[in-house]
Amino acid sequence: MRIMFVLLTAAILSFALLSCSSVTNLDLNKIKSELNLKEFPGQKDYPEADALVLKEEHNINIAIEGNKDTLSTEKFYKVVKLFKNIDHFADVEVSVEGGDEIYDLHARTIQPDSTITELKEEDFHTINGGGDNVMFYTDEKDVKFTLPALEKDCIIEYGYTIKEKNPYMDDLWDIQDDNPKLQSIYKITFPKVFLKNGNPPSPADGLRYCAYNCSLDKPAAQSSNGSGKDTAGTISYTWVQKNIPAFEPESKMPPYSQYLRYAEFSPRNWNTWNDFSKWYYFKYYKPRLNITDLVKQKALEITSGCKDETEKIRSLYNFVQTFRYIAIKLGKAGITPAEPETVLEHKYGDCKDKATLLVALLKSVGINAKPVLVLTADDGRINENFPSMKFNHVIAKAITKDGKDYWMDATVDHCRLGCLPYECENIKVLVLNDDGTSQIEKTPKSNFDENVENIKMKIDLTNRDSTNFDIAMTVKGQENLEYRSLFSEKTSEEILKYCKMMVSDNYLNAKVTNYDISDPDSVDSDFVLHFQLKVPNIIENQGDYSFLNIDPFQFAENLNWLGKEERKYDIEFSYPHMINKSIEVILPENKYKITNLPADLDLNEKGLGYFKKYQAKNDNMITTVEQFSVREKNIAADSYKDVRNFFNGVRSKSNEKIVLTKK
């Protein structure tokens, strides 16, 4: 769980929901004229779509207030024609940052017979503060409302204005989403005083923007002369995108942002990453990096018995890991860390709080430590050529005197030093220096043979009425991290249930008789789960033959994502990993003859590997060795057919049975 950087810094102001009466009536004919349409398209034109966005507008206005303060106002407006699954569109929620104001909020439904049902002011409900599974404390407000009288082919329209009394920092234009759009408009207006040296109006003079997965035509520019106190006037730029297809995601694909159409805007003075990092470091970070005597004393206490820098780093890292993770976004806390002493006293914090405490503790004992701004792998990639506030996480980096780097995510309880959670692996991040400068670096990558699950099973069939299983699972790397997180707070009863759950698909009547696990709170050793279970005899008798299915752990499960014949997007696994299995089966002496063992199989396809080998040592013992590996995190979409064939082969192998006959 991680705290999100807000796009615009928030000040603490009163929240107001004002009258909705100032909004003019919706003119559908005007929209048709803009799009050069006689009639709006219907379901037959978009058979896969739940709805069609007829028009969407984002109007951003930047203004000067006082001598240097800047505020921004966004007017948002959306018109949608509904086709099916209309209940999905009934409830609307608008999030408002703490201190911002929302007004001119309106919503209405236009039925196919042109009847209009409009919401009244009392139909809009404000939910203050609170939290969810990501944000524990927040001063955001949510305005919620339900659109009335929805039916097939009706049109819904709603809009609002949000006044953000804080400096304009960053903005995102979501051009594409999961429904097709006929038209999406983004307009930004700002004072001419933003222009450089009185040069002719140009987007590059007043703002910077970057389009992703699409191209933007040159914006339409409009200039207005000033009046009254505003003697400079304003300059506006408008971008229009039309006939935008729906985005149709696929399972196991890279982050949507790598394929969705969108545009990002940032201030004109963020020309380099150093421009951005100096702004953030000196305005928000350094003032909070207050290394007090209490922090220094604690760092010395924790490291008093350490022999070298690595031991000090490990001890301080492990100490901060024990603090509770609580995400806080109150006012400027969305991007401003808490002071280290405060985190030390409270023993909780979010990612930036814990990372800042860790940096302070490390610096207290003379270790070079730096905060690191991260956009996690599951949320996208930062653009090296377009500085922006596109981060959702903070970690820390320590550098020893001999030049060894240690990357540390203090929000993950069971992550050992030298290991990062997979969301932070092999990605470009922004490392902040003490002088406010920064550099983009790449975090370490783990290989498939470092994230390993080893399963050893001994199956005893010598008992006439039941089969005894002895199962030992040893995991390391990312697998170790996941298992430790899973088992750290489980009771004995819960562990027994989990062990049974792992085999219940194959052996419904299994009974776990005993278990043992390694210390789940340790971070510096591999995790081991050892348990025994008893199931009714697993030998299936059919006439003169007996069949044996010995493996409750199948590799080829949950393959629904392979159901499509073709694939559009690349395949992305969470991380490279490998599973090794070895099974020893002991049969009753002089009772069975091994008639048939499945053939060996060895597959290698596009970063995937699998092999399985059976061996009969005598009529009383059978062994199998099996390995499944995801060697690369990403596999290109054009290899999809090969990937399907690979998993079909693995699945077929898992369904094969050993054939026995009675002597």
Image (tube, rainbow, N blue to C red):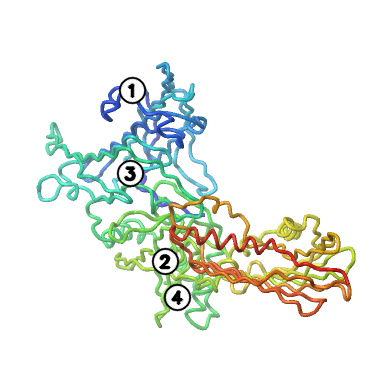
Tell me the mark number nearer the camera, choosing from 3 and 4: 3
Reading the image, the residue beneath label 3 is 173
- x and y percentages locating residue 102 in the rendered image: 37, 33
Q: Position of residue 620 (x, y in %)?
A: 82, 76
Q: What is the x, y in percent for residue 456? A: 70, 72
In depth, the one of 234 and 245 nearer the eye is 245
Viewer-side residue, 595 vs 552: 595
Q: Which of marks 3 and 4 is nearer the N terminus?
A: 3
- With 621 as the anchor, is 577 left or right in this view? left
What's the distance in space between the residues labelled 4 and 1, CA to CA?
65 Å
Within-10-Å neighbours for mark 4: few <14, some 14–19, many 20+: some
Q: Mark 2 points at which residue?
A: 291
User: Looking at numbered disc 4 in the image, what kind of residue is underneath it?
Assistant: Val
Q: Is residue 208 above or below residue 244?
A: below
Q: Which amino acid does label 1 sit on?
A: Leu
Give the residue at x 43% y 23%.
109
> Which of the two discs, 2 and 3, labels the residue nearer the N terminus?
3
Identify the residue under disc 4.
Answer: 365
Q: Which residue is drawn at 43% across and 36% down?
A: 94
Residues tagged 4 and 1 counted as in contact (Cβ below 8 A): no
SS at mark 2 in the image: loop
Q: How far apart are marks 2 and 3 (CA)?
A: 40 Å
Quadrant of the image containing the C terminus: bottom right
Whether 106 is drawn above or below 486: the answer is above
Q: In the shown orientation, is residue 38 left or right of residue 124?
A: left
Residue 57 falls in which quadrant of the image? top left
Q: Which tag, 2 or 1, sits closer to the chain's start?
A: 1
- The residue tagged with tag 4: helix, strand or loop? loop
Compared to residue 486, the image places residue 183 above or below, namely above
Mark 2 Cα-neighbour bin, 10 Å: few <14, some 14–19, many ≥20: some
In this figure, which residue is indicated by the disc labeled 1?
Answer: 26
